[in-house]
Amino acid sequence: MDSVVNTAPASGKGGIEWAPLTRFLMARLAYPLAGIGVLLALWWLGGWVIANTPGTESFAGFAPGPTFARLGELLSSGEVWIAVVPSLERIGLGLLWAVLIGVPAGVAIGLFAALREVSHVPFQFLRMISPLAWMPVAVLAFDTWDAAIVFLVAVAAVWPVLFSSAQGVRRIDPLWFKVARNLGADGLQMLRRIIFPAIAQDIFAGIRLAVGVAWIVLVPAEYLGVTSGLGYAINDARDTLEYDTLAAVVVVIGVIGFVLDGVCVTLIRRFSWHEEA
Amino acid sequence: MTDSIRTDFISHTFKGQRSPTLLDIDVTIRAGEQVALIGRSGCGKSTLLHMLAGLLLPTEGCVRIHGRQVTRPSEKWNMMFQKPSLYPWMSVADNVGLGLAFAGRKDPQRVAYLLELVGLSEKAAANPQSLSGGQQQRVALARSLATSPEVLLLDEPFSALDAFTRSSLQDEVSRIAREQNLTMVMVTHDIDEAVAMADRVLIMAANPGRIVGEIQVELTSPRQRATPEFSRQREALMTSFEQLVGGETTAAEEEEPEQAGKRKAA
Ligand SMILES: Nc1ncnc2c1ncn2[C@@H]1O[C@H](COP(=O)(O)OP(=O)(O)O)[C@@H](O)[C@H]1O
Ligand SMILES: [Mg+2]
């Protein structure tokens, strides 16, 4: 290492070497930027076609230009947060319930074969029901629209968390249990020191899938009843024919979803104990 | 010397099996004694060791350690397995201190002392996955010793290691066990290992698993493998083993024909 440092000043006297940095950024960013470029180009093309087709001119607000202009306004006025915050609260609460129910249930199913056998058919059956099909039930069962939406998010999110936790437990090396028992671990210590650390990454992998489904379920769920949130904002913009606002909200939804997924990926990495290859 | 471990006519039949895996095992091991249990693969050595550790209860008879009946695992007797099974989400030091943490008395000084004992002080903060197989087994040994057990049970803990690491670990464990006056029961199918480490060797035969003989190892410690006395002991053990169980053929022999030519009992 020393020799590398010593030779550096000879070429880039007193300054930072820009070439390697630029090359690094290019290598890391070139493909993602190309992907974003293609998406924007297709979007622009679609907007152009809409604007130039007789009968659809009134939807021209969908094009990138008006959309980003409107997005800028929404951001600078702070209006965007009025839609984002309630949605994030609902998804946060829904995910919290999904984790509080899914992780213990998943661990129990992973540990006890009998429980696994008993729950298999009911869980596979329930899992296949679209969360949105629960809508009427949710509306009847909960006093507030907010609670109903949280319920729908939780119903969508619980399955990936549950199955992923159960999978994680079943993959634990049986010798890890034996060694811990041998060292005098009681049930609670086994959970806290062995099982949870062993499956932490599986739990977060489940949460990552759950965030994906929950975020998809959230928007249609917010079409109903409530007067806040991103789903409501979309519906409202449609009713008032503000297509640039509608498209701007769609962009916001996509960006937040992307960020939430990134957070999950970071957590999975953070809790992974597998040796980096 | 007092008795450390007694088994009172242990017999065991696994669920769903008709013939017993173990039959009338009646052994007494003195405190501080180092005993090796040899026999072919599948004769029930691991099963017996699990019973001594309280990880498995015999269908008949019972195990007593210092007069107390063994009904479950305890920090006073500890077992080491063929795989080190360290927990990869903990540092080496946290792995070593796990038994103490479970007992509710963390003791960083003892952990440091044990790491020094097995020569891995500088690896305290390392991830166990970054260690070699021999180093991992050393950490597992330190972990087993952390709660100051009276009895150390070893189930072929060196068989996955290369020959050099294996013999140095055999010497090291033997030295530590003698220094700390541990009672040690080790399972092996390696006759050299038995001669290198044990005061007494119990010979087990299969179907049903039973003790068919024993031989005293008349060597001082530390043991020099290259001496004529060592060879003589090994020959004596080989001869006894062949006489007592030699005629049997086992699945293990059919699986591993190349082992037959080596000085191994399985
Ligand atoms: N959990 C179990 N259920 C049924 N049979 C078992 C079980 N564990 C071991 N056995 C049988 O008991 C016999 C002895 O096994 P083991 O004690 O592992 O032998 P060794 O350690 O001497 O190689 C083997 O025939 C094995 O198949
Ligand atoms: Mg075995």
Image (cartoon, coloured by chain):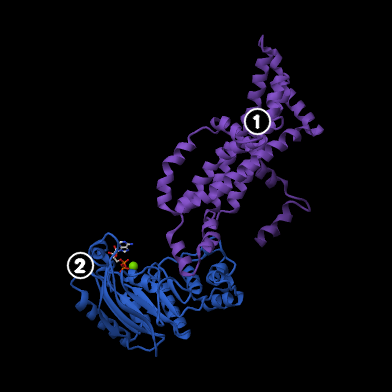
Q: Is residue A29 visible?
A: no
* Disc number placed over residue A270 in the picture, else none: none
Relative to B218, say whether A104 is above or below. above
Q: Secondary structure at mark 1?
A: loop
Above or below, comparing residue B244 to residue A71 in the picture:
below
What is the chain identity of the residue bearing mark 2? B
* Amino acid carrying mark 1 in the image: Glu
- Label count reads 2
Which chain is indicated by disc 1?
A: A
Q: Residue A276: which quarter of the image?
A: bottom right
Q: What chain is the purple one?
A: A
Name the mark nearer the viewer: 1 or 2. 1
Q: Which mark is residue A222?
A: 1
User: Looking at the image, is A75 positioned above or below residue A263?
Assistant: above
Q: Quadrant of ligand 1?
A: bottom left
Position in image of residue A18 (x %, y %): 72, 46
Residue indicated by mark 2: B249
Disc 1 packing (10 Å; few <14; some 14–19; many ≥20):
many
Chain B is shown in which shade? blue
Q: Nearer the viewer, residue B239 or B48?
A: B48
Residue found 65% across the figure and 45% down from its top: A24
